[in-house]
Amino acid sequence: MPDSAGRATLQELVGDALRDGADLARKEFGLFKAEMATNAAGLAKGAIMFLAAAVFGVASLIWLTQALVYGIDIFVQSPWISALIVGGLLAVIAGVLAMIGKNMLAASSLTPTRTVQSLKRDGEVLSERTIG
């Protein structure tokens, strides 16, 4: 209730600030939910497209591998030797890719180091402000 000069009391100002803060938080959370729903739908569509691409990629790799076997068979005149050559080549490629992937996984860390450093720095700043 305003005082005799028409100014709001401290209690009213604090109450208004709390209501406005809660209202703002509610609206921001609603915006967050709507945005995340839109992002999730787009992410799901993208994942489905990658899955379809993977299926067609594997199918094309099978057919291209078979064509390579037939092509090598023309030169070596033996279907089983040409299949062995292609199979060995694919095994070497798979082994190299597996070793590269293993090295990449070993080098990466799932620990959010920047976030941890930021939280430590924030804690230090807060403790300095409360002590000093």
Image (cartoon, rainbow, N blue to C red):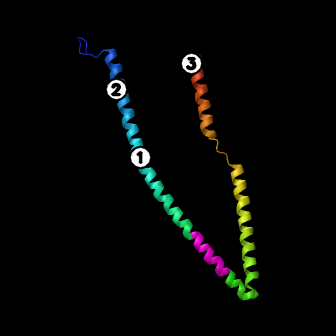
Q: Nearer the viewer, residue 37 or 119?
A: 37
First to last magenta residue range: 57-68
Q: Nearer the viewer, residue 45 or 2?
A: 45
Residue 54 x, y percent position in the rendering: 56, 65
How far is disc 1 from disc 2 in space, using C-alphas? 24 Å
Residue at 37 percent of width and 33 percent of height: 24
**Disc 1 designates what residue?**
35
118 vs 94, left or right, is left
14 vs 112, left or right, is left
Q: Nearer the viewer, residue 5 or 36?
A: 36
| Label 3 with label 2: CB-CB less than 8 Å | no
* Residue 33 to residue 131: above or below: below
* Residue 112 to residue 60: above or below: above
How far is disc 3 from disc 2 in space, using C-alphas? 28 Å
**Disc 3 designates what residue?**
130
Three-letter amino acid code of the residue under disc 1:
Glu
**Residue 67: in magenta span:** yes
Which structural element holds mark 1? Answer: helix
Mark 3 or 2, nearer chain start: 2
Mark 1 or 2, nearer chain start: 2
**Residue 8: in magenta span:** no
**Disc 2 designates what residue?**
19
Residue at the far top: name it: 4
